[in-house]
Image (cartoon, rainbow, N blue to C red):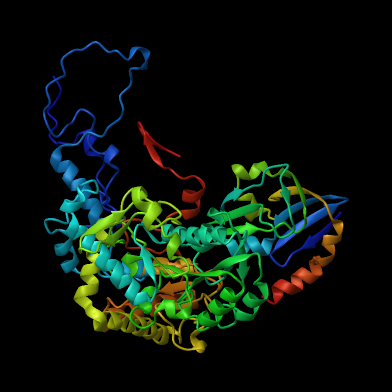
């Protein structure tokens, strides 16, 4: 008989960890180190007891699976803890300042959620009889009215699902208009200051893309654009305010020149938040513009909700708008114009982009946002967003290089570069240092027109106190980069993971769990 | 064999009517770690200024413009498994594609090494 194990140690307990600043578990107090769900528990564990299935003859022959499929095995509390722990490692708008941009940063008022969860909105189905969803159709119709009013345009296609989808809708409308004119124009001009999705959209729709350079002041080079216009140019795609955070003051002159040359103007409205209630793109000669509802009208995209990208259209492009859309009848009732009646209602429509009517849940939230803010409130949104961005710009331009700071106020975002950092220090180091300070980093390395870009979009969401804390943190990290603090090169030091090998992750991505190991 | 450079930071080694194209050391240093190279298919026709090849880095996806017109003769398949060659050996082992030139006169507008070095010193 063996002697009793008085020490109580067994191999599965592991070796005690008694030196250094690492803990035995890998946890740091309440910051818990969480493994993959496949690495927790074992396949014999289940959350519920299920009786063994009665024996049955398989009719799959040699197609029947013979190996275990490798599902994780966890009890219910283990499963709940796993996802709750992961959620604690997430960082979002409801946790802190997130200067990536209005896409993720804009606060979604809880009033919107209450409205979206109202009985009658939350459970509607797109195949319900029309007479039972008149309220939902009225939401689409009223939101469409406000989008057209706020942009000074002729009509709006509500169905596109997000910004890039909206771009495609606008470009397909331009293509249909050109085809109706019997013209075969092949070129879309895209300025350097445009969003990256713009050239991708034009190429996807079958156009060839040509770049228009930016001026020293970060705007579209009007002379270069005019020089390139001609009978082969279908139109331009221009982002306003642009990706340098600047308003394009020549947009009306650009539109006039493009129209005179027989082309159309697509405006990327991703940054509409900075000008809503102040400027109507229709007055600037825009023919089509998508509105990211989640960037301007607060529907929760960064929090995990879907995007939504209605496209407002000029009178010239309205006849080509896609199906379906909501139409108000003479008796006040609402119906959907679909293929059955398109020959009468919308004979030139270029077709359909989605199965149903767009992101209904986002429409409800966007309309709640518009109506709860009112005209004066929306105008203040734009003013506060621009004020906040300029506060960031002017507070930091003494420490960070602001390439367009001399050209006047910025719009929705403040742009800085890595000029002046110590040898070997980059924008990436500053971004990682900000994580240690408890902030999600800003957009980095975009736009491409400046070196080592850092693009901060605070939106109207933040208070002065929150902005001051961020400005203080970024100033501190920027000074470390300028002075060459070696500790910054290995930041973050206090996050659940240290500096990750992003290059290896991109070159040899591990995308799936296969049995007992992850595979690329 | 003669090497020419473009303002978009490509180089081309020309031997008769055959050219080998890559991006310069300056270009790779600006792009950062290269993660993927989208190479052109042999046999495809390109015009000067077309972008038959795309280089992805941790920072951006960048078009590589053909310095000349012609037909793609071959691509550097080694970059499929080792795109980092563009970082470690950009002006030799990290070449991108070989092209049969259709108009050697197009080379007249390109820079030699001295002119290119002076050009990037200004950037």
Relative vertical location of residue A293 with respect to residue B64 in this rendering, above or below: below
Relative vertical location of residue A185 with respect to residue A4 in this rendering, above or below: below
Q: Quadrant of residue B103?
A: bottom right
Q: Quadrant of residue A51?
A: top left
Where's residue A450, x and y in %?
A: 55, 74
Q: Nearer the viewer, residue B52 or A232?
A: A232
Q: Is residue B80 visible?
A: yes
In the shown orientation, is residue A250 left or right of residue A10?
Answer: right
Residue drawn at x 44%, y 62% is A319
Where's residue A91, x and y in %?
A: 28, 61
In the shown orientation, is residue A214 left or right of residue A173?
Answer: right
Q: Nearer the viewer, residue A439 or A213?
A: A213
Where's residue A44, x and y in %?
A: 20, 27
**Which residue reaches farthest right?**
B16
Residue drawn at x 48%, y 69% is A316
Where's residue A153, x and y in %?
A: 39, 73
Q: In which quadrant of the rendered image does the N terminus of chain B lie?
A: bottom right
Q: How many marks?
A: 0
Q: In which quadrant of the rendered image does the C terminus of chain B lie?
A: bottom right
Residue drawn at x 15%, y 15% is A54
Q: Is residue B59 visible?
A: no
In the shown orientation, is residue A330 left or right of residue B34?
Answer: left
Relative vertical location of residue A213 with respect to residue A519 in this rendering, above or below: below
């Amino acid at each position: 008989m063996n002697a009793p194990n008085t020490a109580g140690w067994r191999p599965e307990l592991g070796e005690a960890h008694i030196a250094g600043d690492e803990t035995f578990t890998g946890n740091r107090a309440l910051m818990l180190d969480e493994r993959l769900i496949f690495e927790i528990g074992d396949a014999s564990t289940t959350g519920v007891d299920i009786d063994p299935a009665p024996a049955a003859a398989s009719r799959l022959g040699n197609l029947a699976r013979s190996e275990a499929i490798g599902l994780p095995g966890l009890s219910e509390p283990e499963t709940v803890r796993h996802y709750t722990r992961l959620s604690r490692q997430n960082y979002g708008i409801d946790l802190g300042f997130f200067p990536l941009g209005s896409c993720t940063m804009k606060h979604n008022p809880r009033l919107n959620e209450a409205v979206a969860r109202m009985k009658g909105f939350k459970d509607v189905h797109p195949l319900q009889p029309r007479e039972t969803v008149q309220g939902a159709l009225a939401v689409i119709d009223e939101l469409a009215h406000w989008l057209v009013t706020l942009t000074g345009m002729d009509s709006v296609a509500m169905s596109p699902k997000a910004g890039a989808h909206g771009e495609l809708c606008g470009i397909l409308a331009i293509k249909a208009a050109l085809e109706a004119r019997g013209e075969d124009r092949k070129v879309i001009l895209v300025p350097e200051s445009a969003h990256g999705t713009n050239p991708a959209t034009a190429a996807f729709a079958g156009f060839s893309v040509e770049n228009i350079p930016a001026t020293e002041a970060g705007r579209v080079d009007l002379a270069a654009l005019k020089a390139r216009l001609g009978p082969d140019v279908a139109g331009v795609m221009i982002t306003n305010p642009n990706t340098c955070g600047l308003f394009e003051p020549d947009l009306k002159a650009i539109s006039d020149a493009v129209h005179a040359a027989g082309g159309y103007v697509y405006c990327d409205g991703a940054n509409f938040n900075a000008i809503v209630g102040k400027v109507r793109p229709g007055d600037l000669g825009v023919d089509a513009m998508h509105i990211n509802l989640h960037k301007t009208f607060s529907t929760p995209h960064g929090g995990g909700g879907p995007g939504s990208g209605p496209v407002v259209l000029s009178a010239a492009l309205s006849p080509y708008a896609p199906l379906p859309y909501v139409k108000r009848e003479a008796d006040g009732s609402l119906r959907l114009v679909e293929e059955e009646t398109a020959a009468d209602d919308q004979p030139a429509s270029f077709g359909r982009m989605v199965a149903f009517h767009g992101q209904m849940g986002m429409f409800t939230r966007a309309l709640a946002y518009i109506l709860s803010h009112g005209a004066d409130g929306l105008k203040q949104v734009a003013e506060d967003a621009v004020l906040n961005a300029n506060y960031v710009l002017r507070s930091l331009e003494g420490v960070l290089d602001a390439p367009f700071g001399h050209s006047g106020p910025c719009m929705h975002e403040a742009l800085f570069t890595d000029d002046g950092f110590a040898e070997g220090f980059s924008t990436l180091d500053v971004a990682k240092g900000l994580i240690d300070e408890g902030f999600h980093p800003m957009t980095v390395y975009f736009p491409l027109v400046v070196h080592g870009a850092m693009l901060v979009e605070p939106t109207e969401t933040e208070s002065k106190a929150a902005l001051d804390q961020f400005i203080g943190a970024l100033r501190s990290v920027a000074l470390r980069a300028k002075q060459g603090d070696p500790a910054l090169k290995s930041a973050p030091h206090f996050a659940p993971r240290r500096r990750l090998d992003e290059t290896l992750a991109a070159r040899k991505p591990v995308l799936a769990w296969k049995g007992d190991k992850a595979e690329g | 064999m003669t090497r020419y450079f473009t303002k978009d930071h490509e180089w081309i080694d020309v031997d008769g009517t055959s050219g080998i194209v890559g991006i310069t050391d300056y270009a790779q240093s600006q792009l950062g770690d290269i993660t993927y190279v989208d190479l052109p298919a042999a046999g495809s026709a390109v015009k000067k200024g077309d972008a038959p090849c795309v280089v992805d880095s941790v920072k951006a996806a960048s078009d590589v413009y053909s310095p000349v017109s012609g037909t793609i003769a071959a691509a550097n398949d080694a970059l499929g498994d080792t795109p980092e060659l563009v970082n470690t050996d950009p002006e030799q082992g990290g070449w991108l594609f070989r092209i049969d030139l259709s108009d050697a006169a197009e080379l007249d507008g390109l820079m030699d090494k001295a002119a290119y070095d002076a050009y990037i010193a200004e950037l």
